[in-house]
Amino acid sequence: MPAKAVTALRLVRGAPSRPHVEPVSTGIPFARATVMRPEQIAVVDSAGRRLASDATPLAYWPDGSLRWVLIDCLVDRERQSRRHHSD
């Protein structure tokens, strides 16, 4: 079984607001040879449930692996954090 690379991104609630869903976009860097295809990337919540998301490659390493990826997802303000995992 191949090793699993994990990149965690924790979103912390700022000022109090009514519960709502909002879009979040962020760039995530990956080490060389860690992730080869955007399909290997998943966004999950703190309970491990997969969320709808999109991963767009922005830059590649010379070996063809992903160097920078733009992640877009919808975040539910009811939840305190989200984590980003790559398989």
Image (spheres, rainbow, N blue to C red):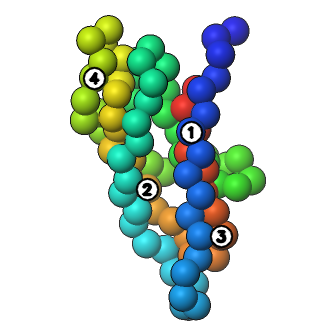
Left or right placement of residue 81 versus residue 60 in this view = right
The local secondary structure at tag 1 comes to loop
Of the numbered discs 2 and 1, the one sitting upstream in the chain is 1
Residue identifier under label 1? 7
Horizontal and vertical percent position of residue 25 = 36, 57
In which quadrant is the N terminus drawn? top right
Of the numbered discs 4 and 3, the one sitting upstream in the chain is 4
Residue identifier under label 4? 60
Residue identifier under label 2? 73
Mark 1 → mark 4, Cα distance in angstroms: 17 Å
Of the numbered discs 2 and 4, the one sitting upstream in the chain is 4
Of the numbered discs 1 and 4, the one sitting upstream in the chain is 1
Mark 4 → mark 3, Cα distance in angstroms: 33 Å
- Mark 3, Cα crowd under 10 Å, few <14 / some 14-19 / many 20+, is some
- Tell me if residue 33 can be seen: yes
Please, what is the three-letter code of the amino acid marked with disc 3? Arg
Q: Residue shown at 64%/23% (left/top)?
A: 4
